[in-house]
Amino acid sequence: MGEVIVVIGAGLIGQAIARRVGSGKHTVLADLHQENADAAADIMRNAGFDVSTASVDIASRQSIQALVETATQSGTVTGLIQAAGVSPSQASPQTILAVDLYGTAVVLEEFGNIMARGGSGVVIASQSGHRLGALTAEQDSALATTPAEELLALPMLQPDQVQDSLHAYQLAKRGNALRVMAEAVRWARRGARINTISPGIIITPLANDELNGPRGAGYRRMIALSPVGRAGTPDEVGNVAALLMGSDGAFITGSDVLMDGGVTASYFYGELKPE
């Protein structure tokens, strides 16, 4: 059996990364909806990739453990792409924290237990995590190191503290970057690396939901007033992921790459700065 790349979240970003790092390896495409994984797999197979599919609910440790078992039966897992999640327009604060924060923490724990020496992974976070106000050192540490099964019980994540979906999303994505920093230390004991990418507005069906949703005007303003002046593409995220996961990125672990066309820069120092 050969090398296996596991992609969680079979959307356009997950597919774009898989195309960059999956050549000559077996790719397991996993998604909450089996039909999404199957459709993505058909596209990749038609382009010459070796692909199988699975369904997974990352809000369930049991489901993630089943995916780990499926992946290890296919070969040696040398790559992980965690691109699954829900957006502020799609879900309640509680669901966002359960999927994007808790789910990612469990993925990192479970795959960190079996990742092969020389393996690497990327977690897709978000520019939103960079626009959350500063947390205390204690809060940072709690998000980074609290065992996954205790995460959602943290006082800072209770309904009286997190009352809207955007705040929940910002906390989850900040938590992803912090969790990856901590997990990078543990993954290193297996000789493996893990990083996050924090994209800005990348044109995908999920982004189109946001652009046409209740916050759409704000997102369109972000694009217009960003230094680059446009949204990004999944393939551009794939380029960064390929660097982080490949030999050229061998000195990079526990890091977060912000790639948002300068939106965050403009938010702090440019025309997007709040009044």
Image (tube, rainbow, N blue to C red):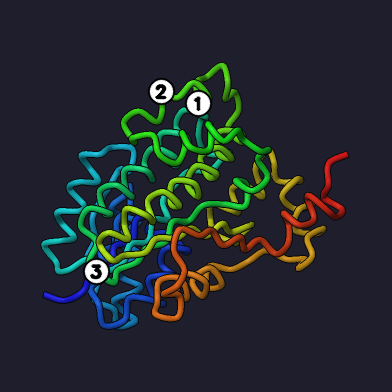
**Amino acid type, label 1:** Leu
Q: CA distance from mark 1 to mark 2?
A: 7 Å
Q: Is residue 31 left or right of residue 230?
A: left
- Where residue 117 is drawn, which disc sits there? 3
Residue at (26%, 82%) from the top-left corner?
24
Under tag 1, what secondary structure? helix
Image quadrant in which the N terminus is located: bottom left
Q: Is residue 42 left or right of residue 146?
A: left
Image quadrant in which the C terminus is located: top right
Front position among marks 3 and 2: 3
Q: Mark 2 — residue?
A: 153
Q: Relative to 209, does residue 40 appear above or below in the rendering? A: below
**Amino acid type, label 3:** Arg
Under tag 3, what secondary structure? loop
For the residues labelled 1 and 2, say whether their Cβ atoms are less than 8 Å apart: yes
Q: Mark 1 — residue?
A: 157
